[in-house]
Image (cartoon, rainbow, N blue to C red):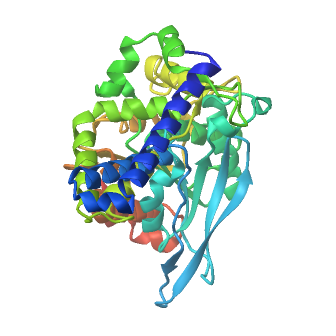
Amino acid sequence: MKYMFAYDLMESVRNTNEWMGATARAMASYPAFAMSMNPALPLIAAWGEVAERSFSRMNDKPDWGIRSIVGPDGTDHIVDVVPVVERPFGSLMHFSVRRREPMARKVLLIAPMSGHYATLLRSTVASLLPDCDVYVTDWHNARDIPVSAGKFDVEDYTLYIVDFLRALGPETHVIAVCQPAPLALAATAYLAAEEPAAQPRSLVLIGGPVDPDAAATEVTDFGRTVTMGQLEQSMIQRVGFKYKGAGRAVYPGLLQLNGFISMNMERHTKAFTEQIFRVARGEAGDHDAHNRFYDEYLAVMDMTAEFYLSTVERIFKNREIAKNEFVVAGRRVDIGAITNVAVMTVEGANDDISAPGQCVAALPLLTGLEESKKSHHLEPGAGHYGIFAGRSWRINIRPLVLSFIDIHSGGPKAKAKGGIRLAASK
């Protein structure tokens, strides 16, 4: 698998399916065929439309699509997405709201690098913008990064977070979603030892695998049963000639997407079958629920091979974060060095990706942090997506997170009203 022809073959299959969808839609929609009144023609055209859209989305980076927000004065405020720090493998982006006074809450939202773009957190960003000054880590597609840019593994990822925090300053509140939770914890501990003045005010870890062995899921079972050699041989390919990163070893997005879909094949098959019939009946819309979800879900990005393999080996197999043995740039990162940063963990009771127990495992590692600065929330009935972007996030978790941020913002007013709010978040 570790060859360019395998990568190009997958891209050729994707491209061919997109072309077949476009051809089927165009031919079945030919005006002269309408005279036959054949009921199969609308279905063929509908299948073509859905197929063309689906396979084309796999090759596109979605737009953030956040044009404006309503300010406290009731008027629309334009939102600009502005790069603050630009690096080869990821950038720090600021959602700058025009004509708005500086916000008291400065939030860095660390997006996962696990197959999808940072735009997976679009609804999370939109929900925070009215109340916070929001920054997001925008990780780049490895296929577009030349080999000359070098490697990028879990240590480099951690140091990127460190650099972003340095750029934002000590009044920052960090929210790490899913995969980056353990590495955000490590980055904070790194700063606690090396540059305490650059530490964030608070750190919220949402549904992340700090200790994967704390609760078994399909993801952890897979990590335990497969060897690193098997992973490298079966999952790693080299980017084809079509892209700037030609020759770079990656875990391809299309291969990741195949894994995502196979985990819930029946649900996805039903969703696409129903969408084809809706299109055939003229009931579908360009921005209906199906298209809104799958336009994002099908847009996948390649990961560098070293990042994927080091994540599996060091975070899941060796459990270096859980054992407090993680090393960055030759230095052991001691989680116990965190003494001033308030830490909150959030889990979903029905999370089948990072099951309850995996994220809250961060709190016992914080041996140098007083208990009043630790908090945990378990959301009943919530799955993985729901705890950062779904109904549970909007109704229950977001208010608790904002309350936690206010308590630990350092101002006298926040301290005075902190006790009641902290109790609510536990």
Position of residue 124 relative to residue 246, above or below, is below
Please tell me which residue lies in front, 301 or 28.
28
The residue located at (75%, 29%) in the rendering is 147
Image quadrant where residue 79 sits: bottom right
How many labels, in total? 0
Position of residue 242 relative to residue 50, above or below, is above
**Residue 57, x across and y down, in percent:** 48, 48
The residue located at (50%, 89%) in the rendering is 75
Residue 139 visible in the displayed image: yes
**Residue 73, x across and y down, in percent:** 49, 91
Residue 423 visible in the displayed image: no
Position of residue 268 relative to residue 12, above or below, is below
Q: Would residue 315 appear left or right of 218 to someone viewing this image?
A: right
The residue located at (49%, 83%) in the rendering is 71
The residue located at (53%, 39%) in the rendering is 113
Position of residue 129 relative to residue 390, above or below, is below
Please tell me which residue lies in front, 34 or 268.
34
**Residue 333, x across and y down, in percent:** 60, 29
